[in-house]
Amino acid sequence: PTVMRFIRALRRLERRGEIDGLLELFTPDCELVRGSEGVHLFGRPGLYRFWKDHTEAFDRVDTRFGRILHYQEVAILEW
């Protein structure tokens, strides 16, 4: 259920620029780590920055998921 909510929210961001649906899926004190870049972003402001940067890096974004694995409290989405 949460995985599908994430996918739907991501599609709304990509198609209509609506970011609120994604932000609502995370707690206010969330932490996002871009390990390859050594960047740590905190809270919804950091999350907002991440998704804005992600979508603005492309002229058009249409995420395709190659594999979705979900077991209990863990989910892996390949794209």
Image (cartoon, grey):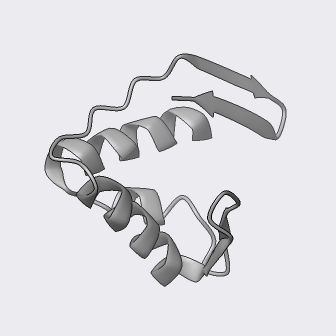
Q: Residue drawn at (38%, 37%), measured in percent from left and top?
A: 8
45, 58: nearer the viewer: 58
Q: Look at the picture and state if 54 lies above or below 59.
A: below
Q: Residue drawn at (51%, 29%), measured in percent from left and top?
A: 79
Q: Residue furthest right?
A: 72
Q: Residue furthest front?
A: 37
Specify the quadrant of the image occupied by residue 17: bottom left
Q: Look at the picture and state if 47 lies above or below 25.
A: below
Specify the quadrant of the image occupied by residue 38: bottom right
The quadrant of the rendering that contains the N terminus is top right
Specify the quadrant of the image occupied by residue 14: top left
Across and down, in percent, residue 6 comes to 49, 43
Give the left or right position of residue 44, taking residue 61 as reference.
Answer: right
Q: Residue furthest top?
A: 66
5, 39: nearer the viewer: 39
Across and down, in percent, residue 64 comes to 40, 23
Across and down, in percent, residue 40 comes to 66, 76
Give the left or right position of residue 54, taking residue 4 as reference.
Answer: left
Q: Residue drawn at (84%, 32%), measured in percent from left and top?
A: 72
Q: Residue drawn at (18%, 42%), measured in percent from left and top?
A: 15
39, 44: nearer the viewer: 39
Q: Look at the picture and state if 43 lies above or below 7.
A: below
Across and down, in percent, residue 63 comes to 36, 31
Give the left or right position of residue 11, taking residue 38 as reference.
Answer: left
Question: How many marks are shown on the rendered structure?
Answer: 0
